[in-house]
Image (cartoon, rainbow, N blue to C red):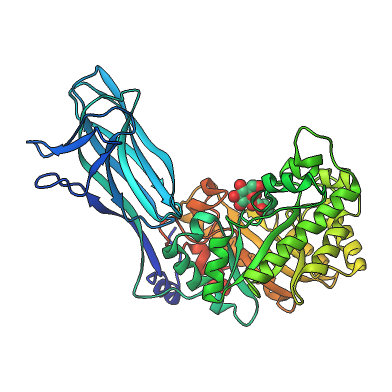
Amino acid sequence: MKKFVPFVLLALLLVSGAEAENQLVYRSDFSTSEDGWYARSAGGAAVSLTADDSLLIEGRTSDWNSPGRNFDLQPGQEYQLSVQVRQTEAGEARFMISIAHSVGGVESYENLGAAMAKKGEWTTVNGQYTAGAFDQYVLYVETTGAAALSFEIKDFTVTQRVIEENADPLPALKDIYAEKFDFGTAVTYYEAINKQRMDFYATQFNIFTPGNELKPDSVLDIKESKKLAAGDETAVAVHFDAAKPLLDYAKEHGLKVHGHVLVWHQQTPDAFFREGYSTSKPYVTREVMLARLENYIKAVMAYMEENYPGVIVSWDVLNEAVDDGAAKLRSSKWLTIVGEDYPARAFEYARKYAPEGTLLFYNDYNTALEPKQTGIVNLLKDLIAEGNIDGYGFQMHHDLAFPGNEQIEKSLQRIAGLGLQLRVSELDVTVPDHTDDTLQRQAKKYAAIMKMLDEYTDRLLAVQVWGVTDDLSWRAPKYPLLFDKDFQPKPAFWAVADPASVEEK
Ligand code: 9MR
C-alpha cells in the first residue's frame, strides 16, 4: 500500500546537498602524440606511436620498464583505471597497472590491477586506486616475468568519483541541533585526506572523531619505543601520521575533534605490554606498565596541546572495558598486568595531563543489555568516586529491533541518573537490505532514538554517527548510515533532521 507522504516531507525529498557520480577524467589519445606518456627506464627502453594509434614500448630490460604518465590525482579520491594491451612475442604474458607515488622525494609503489594477455590479442587490464596523500603520481603499465617483452597500449582511461554540491543545500544536522548538542561523525584517514568529502561533511557536522587514527596501534611508535626502552623501560614514543589530516582539517576550519581512544584492549600492540617492547619477551610489571600508560597519555596530550591547541575538546579515555557476559571488567592485558584499578589510573593520568576543560569519557557498547549495564554502572560509580571522569559515551551500534526502544530508554535513564554528561558516540542502525520499506523502518528507529535523546539535552553534549556514507561504514553490507554511497540523504537522514515528522506506527 502506498504511504501518505506529507507535502513538506515531499518537498524536502526533492532537495539534496551533494551527489557523487563516476566521471571519465582521462582517455589516452595516441593519434597525434605520446600524450604525455614516456618510457620508465634506466636508459634502454623507448616509446613510439604506431600506425594504429597505440603506443609501443621497445628495448625493455626490466619488468618495471614501462609506458608511464604523470597524473594529477586528488588525495582520498577513488579512481577506476583501464587500459588495452597487446603483445606479439610470448604465448601469454601478465600485465599490471601500477602506480609510483612520491612524497618528499621518497618514491613507493602499488600494483592496482592485473590481467593475462594472449599473443596478438588486445586485452583489457582493469585496476582501481584510492589516492593516498602524495606530491606526485605516475601511473604505468608493466609486466611480471616478461622483462624484455615489447608491447603496445591504447585506451588508457581514468574514471573518478566526483562529488558535486547541488544548488539546493540540505538542512544541516549541526544547525538543527545547534542549541541542544553537537552533531558529529567518525572519519577515517582516506576520508580525511579527501577534501571534497570533508567539505561536504563539514556542511553537516561540527565535531569529528578519527575512526581509527588515534587508537594506540596508530599512535604508538614501537620501533622508537624499543630504542628508548634500552635506556628506560618506561619510555614511550608516539607519532600522529594517521590522525594529522583530520586534525589539520579541523584546525583549519574551526571544527571540534573528540579523541578516540587512549586505553582499549583492542588495536593496541602486544609489544606495548612487553619488556623492551619485544613480542618475544615477558610482560612488564605493573609498575612499568603504569609508568608507560602515564608517559603515553602525557605524550599524546603534550603533542595535541603544542600542535592543535583547543581542537580536541573531549577524549574517550577508556573504551569497552566491561565484560559482555558479566558485571565485571573484561579480561585483558591491562587487567592482568595492572589490575582492577587500571581504569582509575587511566583517568587519573588523563586528568593530570589534559588541558583544562577537556572532558573525559568512558565509552562502551550494548549499554542497554544486562548484566553488562550493571558492570558499566559499577565501573562508572568507581570512577566518579575518584573524581576524574566527566561523562559516558553510548556507542549505540544498533539494528532495527535490537536493542528494543524501551531497553535503550531505560539505559539512558539509569546512566543519566549517575549525574554524568553524556555523548552518543558511534550511532548506526543496520538493516538487512535497502528496499524502500526497510529504509523507512530504519528511519523510524533513528527517529525513535533521536526523540529519546531529546529528553536528555541538559546533559547530552554530542550525537555522533559512526560514518557518513553507507559504503565506507565498518558495517557497509548492512547500510547503517544516513547517506548512501552517492551522498544522497536516506530516509534515516530526514528522520534525524526532523524526528517528529516520522509516525510512530
Ligand atoms: O570503525 C572501526 C573499524 O574501522 C575498525 O576496523 C574496528 C577495529 O576494531 O574498529 C572500529 O571502531 C570501533 C570503535 O573503535 C569502538 N567501538 C566499536 C567500533 C566498531 O567496531
> Which residue is drawn at the image coordinates 55% and 78% (left, top)?
176
Q: Please, is residue 319 above or below residue 153 in the view?
A: below
Quarter of the rendering containing residue 496: bottom right
Q: Is residue 446 left or right of residue 391?
A: left
Q: Nearer the viewer, residue 396 or 406?
A: 396
Please state the horizontal and vertical placement of residue 403, each as a whole percent of the image: 70, 54
Which quadrant, please, contains the N terminus? bottom left
Quadrant position of the C terminus in the picture? bottom right
Instruction: Say left or right for 72 vs 256.
Output: left
Please identify the residue farthest to the bottom as the structure is shown.
179
Picture quadrant where residue 48 is located: top left
Residue 160 % position (x, y): 33, 53
How many numbered circles are shown? 0
Compared to residue 248, the image places residue 402 above or below, namely above
Left or right relative to 96: residue 149 = left
Residue 185 in picture, x, y percent from top left: 58, 64
Q: Is residue 48 left or right of residue 180?
A: left
Res 499 seen here: yes
Which one is in front, 93 or 365? 93
**Image height of 301 relative to 224, above or below:** below
Question: Extreme left residue here?
Answer: 51
Residue at the spot 77% in from the left edge and 62% down from the top edge? 298
Q: Is residue 505 visible?
A: no
Who is closer to the viewer here, 196 or 49? 49
In the rendered image, residue 77, in percent from the top left (x then y), is placed at: 40, 55
